[in-house]
Amino acid sequence: MQKYIFSRLVQSLCILFGVLFIVFFMMQVTGDPVSLLLSRHATPQEVEEMREELGYNRPILIQFTSFVSRAVVGDFGRSFRHKQPAMDLIIERLPATVELAVTALLISLILGIPLGLISGSNPGSFWDVISRGTGLLGQTIPNFWLALILILVFSVNLGWFPSFGRETWHFMGLTLPTRSVILPAFSLSLFTMGQLIRFTRSAVLEIRSEDYVRTAYSKGIPDRKVYIRHILRNASIPLISIVGVQFGYLLSGSIYIETIFSWPGLGNLLAESIGNRDFALVQAIAFFSSFVVVTLNLLTDIAYGLADPRIRYE
Amino acid sequence: MDNNSTGQQIPTGVAASTGLAIDQKQETGLWHFIKYTAHLLARDKAGTIGLIMFVIVVLSAILAPWISPHDPLKQNLRHAKKPPAWYEKGTMEYPLGTDNLGRDILSRIIYGSRVSLTVGFFGVLIASSLGIVIGLFSGYKGGKTDNIIMGGVNMILALPYLVFVVFIAAILGSSLLNVILIFGFTDIPIFVRITRGEVIKMRASGFVESAVSIGATGNRIIFSHLLPNLIGPIVTIATFEMSAMIFYEAGLGFLGLSVPPSVPSWGNMLAAGRKYLVIYPWIATFPGLAIVFTGLGMNLLGDWLRDVLDPRMRRVKK
Amino acid sequence: MAKILEVNDLITRFYTFDGVVHALSGVSFDLDEGETLGIVGESGSGKSVTMMSLLHLLPTPPARIEGGKALFYSNRNEQNNNTDPVDLLQLDKSGIRKIRGGKIGFIFQDALSALNPVMTIGRQISETLIEHLGMTVDEAKKRSIELLEYVGIPEAEKRFSAYPHQFSGGMRQRTMIAVAIACNPEIIIADEPTTALDVTVQAQIIELVQRLKKEMKMSVIWITHDLGVVAGMADRVLVMYAGSAVEIAPVDDLFYNPGHPYTIKLLGALPKIGEEGQHRLESIDGTPPDLLSPPAHCQFAWRCPHAAEKCWQAVPAAREISPGHHAACFFDFAARRP
């Protein structure tokens, strides 16, 4: 198990180093980063000063080394638009994204897993058709379009939920979500829900026909207990991976949903900074999202190892 | 899916004997394969519907100039913001209404399918051809080469895809070619992984060795043994990936990062329609439905392809 | 000797995409108390399907049991002390559940896949005890450890909380046996329990089951495709071919005086120890018939060297050719032999 965790950890670090490499060189190959930072009307002298100031006239390898050494302590330079360190801006926007991601994950778990279970346990039934349909729609309806339709129906026509913005209420020092999170979280959750339905369904179907389930029946264990102890327990292990990966993506921020709902999170910040051509910030967000995704994948792998005795006792 | 799971418990003798008969049929050539596929399609309603939906989209892209009622670019402010035909103020002249500049929405959707399918088709073409070559190389060479290539592949697959696509698109600027290249290149890892997996599986099964032992050379092995076995999984993945690219292209268009706003594309139409969502909701609704329609068709088709092209499934389903 | 199980004309079919698979077309046999019945046949001949049909273990759909009786003469019935038989095929869900694991234990072929990989060995045994005998968790644990010791697993106390993948193949099969005998059943059905094991372990497992059978007074149904195994341990043998029972006979009778050409062929395919090397191992030409469309004549006719015209016209019924020896063939092969 220790060896397993260690090898996963090394892998994750390699991936993160690769990300730094990509983010750094993506800026280099596209031309002079300074020209992106300054307006088109800057004088050559201004450009030169900027290059000097930012260290862009040093050899590329030195630049990369200094980029990496600053990046590991979370320093990605300053946003030229906000005149603030990029990482501070990210940290500031993080709570909104976490709120949205957690809500979306909860919605998709609460709806997706039971639907997948019912569907996998009764293939061909009415509920199977419903769940498979939902799963398919979850994968094919673009969430940015769904968000528009939901706003149209539930905000404009019915007036149940606000159509944009994040409202919170404070209670005993805690910042708690309000109904403003429902529409964006639901639009965001549909894809994950679809994945969970499809995955749970196929896992249950597969495990149902495993030999050890037949053994359980041959021992005279009642159906309900066979489902809970043998089928569900075994299906939940691979489910950990799916949930982990999906949560990683949700946490890295949804650029569409946050833009549409003016949700003050990371995705919105990314869209904003792309609009402003604020590439230091884009760089920082790209790295931060990757960091979140990679870390979650690592945690997922560890959780997976703990849940599966075949790995735990390696 | 369900047929497989239940089928597994049919006594092995039955499954094996039916499987045998099919494998023999398989080897008699491409024509039989096509006939056999058509036979399978006829038994699967969802797959048929998916294929029909996909064909409708392809036909509307090819026949766009002949079937569009209007010029998709022609502005006509006198007819701007007309609702669809079934509304009180709608006319049959503009069946799905007009946008804020008086352009016919139906015509723009028909022409929009051209952008989507072009991006999807060429994106998958680039990704699959490069991916297959790299995957074959990686799986065939093995050892260090394989480790390095797969390290890169796993790294790219572990990244938040959308964030990077948006990042690259923002740097490169918006044009059809750029969008195709972005999707084409970022999607290579998927095809590398699937190709390599198949190569490794086949090497383990021993028939590559037996080909070597009767004197076949590397190239011959690849072309006469590996590629035919790869077609199934590649076609399946290509269908899903093409559908994903159409989805992502629309997303980029929605952010204004895909083709220039003047080109009629579903993403651009959505972006434009968003501004008028409350007053003229049809402008954003119909291009979205077009995306869902295409995605549903391709996913149904892909699910069906996965079922029939997976040799394990074939065994049971016949 | 008293009968404990009597199966009559069992018919099981699978309704698949491709058509109806006639998996069992009228299988009959019986099992005496304390007896070991060997069932042999090629894969797909319906050996396992027969046993799984009895205990309702086949997935429905596609499987359907369409006829027959399976009378179970249980004599360890606590409530009523009579020996009125129950028809296993007519039992409802909860009825059959009491039989499974309680009165009839099942040992499966590949213990690695037949044991739940994420549940401890101990729980998989005690689960049965708790379900059937209403034991508490602690009682069940104590009994499970005894059972593990009984089937010959060393350091049973420690192994109680191990997982299947930590066991060797032989130990896993012993665990399966412990699960099967946990509730002191009257019949043990062993479905090719030794195929996945190497020869020495095979012998140990066979010996173990023989010992348990005697000590616990059980009857054993041993499914295998290995006639050698059957010769060593069975009292009687049932030969199955293409979903039918073609011959049933006491073991010596079957080996020295086979009455069905298929059995003769099977015996020819068995290498004989002590015979001169020039004797060529015979193989049976052809493949088993397609069960999707069984013919209205003898299923073995295609592969039978003695097939005559009537073999292509009707299905031969089982005939008693000597006491306790039945064969489903028009011809009298047993009689022709010296």
Image (cartoon, coloured by chain):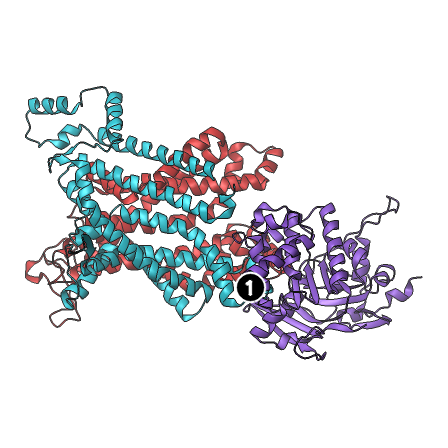
Please indicate whether residue B84 sits to the left or right of residue B15 in the image. left
Q: Nearer the viewer, residue A179 or C223?
A: A179
Q: Is residue B48 visible?
A: no
Residue topped by disc 1: C136
Q: Is residue A52 left or right of residue B217?
A: left
Which residue: 24% across, 47% down? A253
Q: Is residue A71 above or below residue C17?
A: above
- The one nearer the camera, A92 or B80, is A92
Question: What is the chain identity of the residue bearing mark 1?
Answer: C
Colour applied to chain A: cyan
Q: Give SS at disc 1.
A: loop
Q: Is residue C316 visible?
A: yes
Which residue is found at the position 54% from the left and 57% from the top?
A: A210
Expressed as whole percent of the image width and height from the top left, the position of residue B115 reads 25, 49
Q: Which chain is red?
A: B
How packed mark 1 is, by other alpha carbons closer than 10 Å (few <14, some 14-19, many 20 or more), is few
Chain in purple in the render:
C
Image quadrant of residue A15? top left
Find residue C205 and report its horizontal and vertical position in percent: 72, 52
Q: Is residue A109 above or below residue C34?
A: above
Q: Amino acid at mark 1?
A: Thr
